[in-house]
Amino acid sequence: MSHPTPAAAKDRPPPGRRGPLDRFFELTGRGTTVPRELRGGVTTFFAMAYIILLNPIILGGAKDVHGDVLSIPQLTTMTALSAAITTIIMGLVGNVPLALASGLGINAVVAFQAAPQMTWAQAMGLVVLEGVVIVLLAVTGVRELIMNAIPLALKHAIAVGIGAFIALVGMVDGGFISSSAESPPLALGLGGRLASWPSAVFVLSLLLMIVLYVRRVPGAILIGIVVSTVVAVVVQKNASIPAKGPGSWGVVVPDLPDRYFATPDFGLFGKVDVFGGFAEAGVLTAIVVLFTLVLSGFFDAMGTILGVSDEAGLVDEKGQVPRLGRILSVDGLSAALGGVTSSSANTVFVESAAGVGEGARTGLANIATGALFTVTLFLTPLAAVVPAQAAAPALVVVGALMMMRVAKIDWNDLGFAIPAFLTVVVMPYTYSITNGIGAGIVSYTLIKVARGKPREAGWLLWIVTIVFVLYFGLNVVEEVLGVK
């Protein structure tokens, strides 16, 4: 189901007067317009711009085997650069509104699993190898075969699960939900109450987006982000807000910067040792790290591509995405580029759904998003103005839209209902798209066995099931192999 804005029809060019942008990006064929694509692209950028600041914090906060750390300014430049390049390439080659940047979760594997056992250059070398493996799986058609082998009901469940997942991400990032080591593990705001100015900005942004969206106001999500950012800047200037911890803004504090321009530092580009990690950490250790990187990158991107494409109305009646081979190849190349730039593996960002919710349907939206990432190379201080509390509500709104696909699942058939349910709930409960997909696939094949119909799952899905069983039991595998 797509969600066109009311401006779509009147902005659509009449037959016979299609311009070069329309022809190249198939704007008319997909029922969209240049303004809608640009709005969608800008919205996606604001929804994922936090990665420019967060990725350097994660990677820069870790040490490699020799105790060396990466430069935060250099990481900031490389994060924006790799996001700009890969997002634009995806727009031109794949013609889909799927933006890419350094993947959360994957960067944690690089920082806390790979780097402590090898140098940073060697860790980034494994990221390059991850990208190469994913490209090989894409160009040989194996990755597309795996995606097409997943039952349609599970594909819908993946979209629904991603909706629940990004809604939770938005609520946590915005401070609407907080975690605790005590019971209950999740709570409203601070101690069960919304008692801080940042959480008030989140609520204002969310309510504004909901009102504008249901009234079909073009640019509803983007307007919500901009208005809430202005409010956040005013609040920060006039209210007493802690710099860190409970009640704070988090990574991005909405202070107007002293300067708006900064010179990018490209010093980390090309600092990569592709095969050195196998000698430094040992072959088995390097293989386990590489396996984790490939599996996370493979299925996180797969789930996001399916979920966001479904929301954009780009999935056909068989649940297949057009130009899938190109999309998957670009995703693999993007992961490798992340290693070359030392920004960790790039992957398709689930925040692309925010742009889709604003009307994006083609790769033209990616050009807008990539252009803003390019500009950010020189405006890094300005990128630190939009707080999560202003942008994260977009994920909640789009999450609600994606959850609407729950009606497409046959809940009367337990063979689909239980795997779909596990797919949907495991994603937000474990904060991992990969875990949700794995839970759904393993339970689906298990039910086929329980019903005496194991062949109906198909040999390819059985291979994927075995891979996921190994993935979920990775600690046991490491102990058996004696990996440190």
Image (spheres, rainbow, N blue to C red):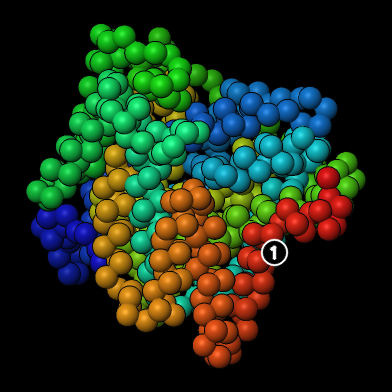
Res 356 → quadrant? bottom left
Residue at image position (75%, 45%) is 125
Q: Secondary structure at mark 1?
A: helix
Q: Quadrant of the N terminus?
A: bottom left
Does residue 397 appear anywhere in the picture? yes
- Relative to 252, does residue 103 appear above or below in the rendering? below
Amino acid carrying label 1: it is Leu
Q: Nearer the viewer, residue 54 or 417?
A: 417
Write down the residue under mark 1: 470
Residue 350 x/y as whole percent: 43, 51
Q: Nearer the viewer, residue 452 or 21?
A: 452
Residue 433 x/y as whole percent: 50, 55
Residue at image position (88%, 47%) is 282
Residue 51 x/y as whole percent: 48, 35
- Relative to 391, does residue 98 appear above or below in the rendering? below
Res 280 → quadrant? top right
